[in-house]
Image: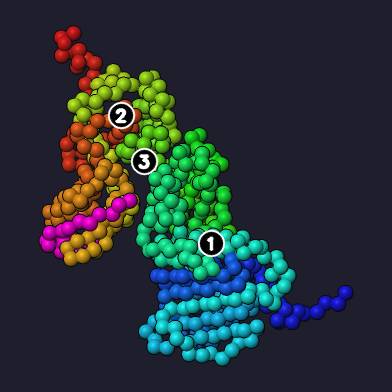
Amino acid sequence: MKIRLLPENVYSLIAAGEVIDRPASVVRELIQNSIDAESTHITLSLENGGKGLIFVNDDGLGMDEGDLKIVTFKHSTSKIATVEDIHQIFTYGFRGEALNSISIVSNFEIESCQREEEEGHNVRIHFGETEKIQPSAITKGTSVTVRDIFFNMPGRKRFLKSDNVEYNYCEKEFMNLAMANPEISFKLISDGRIVHNLKQGTLEKRMTEIKGEEFMNNSLTVNYFDSDIRVYGFIGKPQIYDNRRFNFFYVFVNKRFVFYPQIKRAIYMPFGSQLNRHFTPYIMFIDLDAKMVDVNIHPAKKEVRFFKEDQIFSTVSLSVRESIRHHGRSSKNEDVNMDISRTIEKPEAFVRDSLLFSDIDFALSEKNSESRMQEYSRFWQFNDSYILVDLKEKLYFIDQHAAHERVMYERVMKENEKISSQQLLFPFIVRLPSELYEFYDANKEKIERWGFITREFDKMKILLEGIPSIINENFEQHDFLDFLTEVYSTGSSMRAEEVNKIIACKAAIKAGKKLKISEMEDLFNQLFLCENPYSCPHGRPTFLTFDKDEVGRWFRR
Ligand code: ADP
Ligand code: MG
């Protein structure tokens, strides 16, 4: 046996074939480049499922003549420069090998015009020969044309499937990127026919377009974030998951589609036994510090490795749990939409004297909770405003609004830097009187920290896109006006404590609201988990107690 070094051209062909294994990988790499280039409109055009032609056009930053000269060289990238950068990757690409590989295995052309430049340029690599760079008519962004993929790799070419099958692979890559980037418009044309035309918009809108209203109307929205991780997405409810049509599981890490079935358990766990674990569809996005994840282990970057995987799992479970609480404990009793059932670390004293149960089971069925209650206590509501509890020879008389206000207040006080937000499904426009508008304008950042997501819309008008996660009652235009007015009237200090009181008041259930027994029970538990359960943040008492002797005396016993 004689060992020899492979000639460079053979070696690079093999390497290129590893990066690009079918038209769909070209589609993925080209669209990712367009996204990395900050494009807002991306068009993909295919012929014969990508085997004949793959064309991607964008309106991104573009490249100048110098860039184009080296863009197809091996390891040419603008995205990283040093070893340290590898640990802080915010772009899809960073290896600088996609265009090189694509240009080796196809007839390749790239045209680009950098923003603010007058003239664009064009480079062609035809049957392996790089032609001279030419001026081009392109005026904005970049277009890449890839024809005759694998013309020089007959073995690989033979391996490709039918046009239809290859088209499906391409469409999948297109969709994965479109799902993760709703702020970009995506168009897909196949053999001259427009197949998808997705306009830029919110994630909900994009998902509705892609997965349909039926799925979206029957799914639970997850939206959780704290300082270093954000988990959001959609999980099918029972109506949907018996339906095999909705049999999909998507996980995106930092907007990158990944194959990560291990996460399933963390997503399903909070549902207890209610879920059909094989068929409950989900689309889950996890955004986190690039340092926490390694996307290098797979050339197509489809697999990830998390550092501190356990923490990621528990955050995902927590996010789903929070969402179940927000939307009702189970999809069977959706009308429970009051958020008063979160477990908080309890003070020792309370645990010892535990009133009902220490570990709230989120998937607890209504029946179950009723029977537990029979054992330990009884709850009533008086005048839809007060809760009466008979417990351990005492009668508790609780003001539901004040009590919930206390619970909410302690909860927001715990959120240190930023109060977490929830996206409104239907953002609304709020017209602000000029004085308030000025106040808003001067304090936008703070308002965001308080959990409100706003965008300037027009003169004196803003679009309210998100509110603090803890607010569960219907939140309307006037509520936001009230909030701003109240904060405004606290004067210039705007101390966190004061603002949190206002938010707690907005988030708390009102007097006059009928409560279910389970809700009363939750509120009662939550109140006594507070550090100071005795008064609301404004100082009013939250409850009174009467012991059996006192009640006996009323009746001169
Ligand atoms: P990578 O994406 O890993 O950097 P590529 O080979 O995919 O490597 O691209 C090489 C470089 O070419 C990119 O770093 C980028 O600077 C530039 N580039 C590629 N596609 C585009 C595009 N659509 N718009 C602007 N620049 C692009
Ligand atoms: Mg790239």
The stretch of residues the image draws in magenta is 425-447
At x 41%, y 37%, the residue is: 331
Q: In the image, 203: left or right of 65?
A: left
Label 2 to label 1: alpha-carbon separation = 48 Å
| Chain-order first, disc 2 or disc 1 | 1
As helix, strand or loop, the secondary structure at mark 1 comes to: helix
Decide: marks 3, 1 in contact (CB < 8 A)? no
Viewer-nearest residue: 215 or 197 = 197
| Ligand 2 contact, mark 3 (Cβ < 8 Å) | no
For mark 1, what is the residue?
A: 171
Q: Earlier in the sequence, mark 3 or mark 2?
A: 3
Separation (CA) of disc 3 from disc 2:
15 Å
| 272 part of magenta stretch | no
- What residue did someone put label 2 on? 516
- Outermost front residue: 192
Image point (43%, 63%), residue name: 197
Q: Position of residue 552 (x, y in %)?
A: 20, 12
Three-letter amino acid code of the residue under disc 1: Glu
Residue depth check, mark 2 versus mark 1: number of the one nearer the observer: 1
Which residue in the rendered view is the most extreme toward the right? Answer: 1
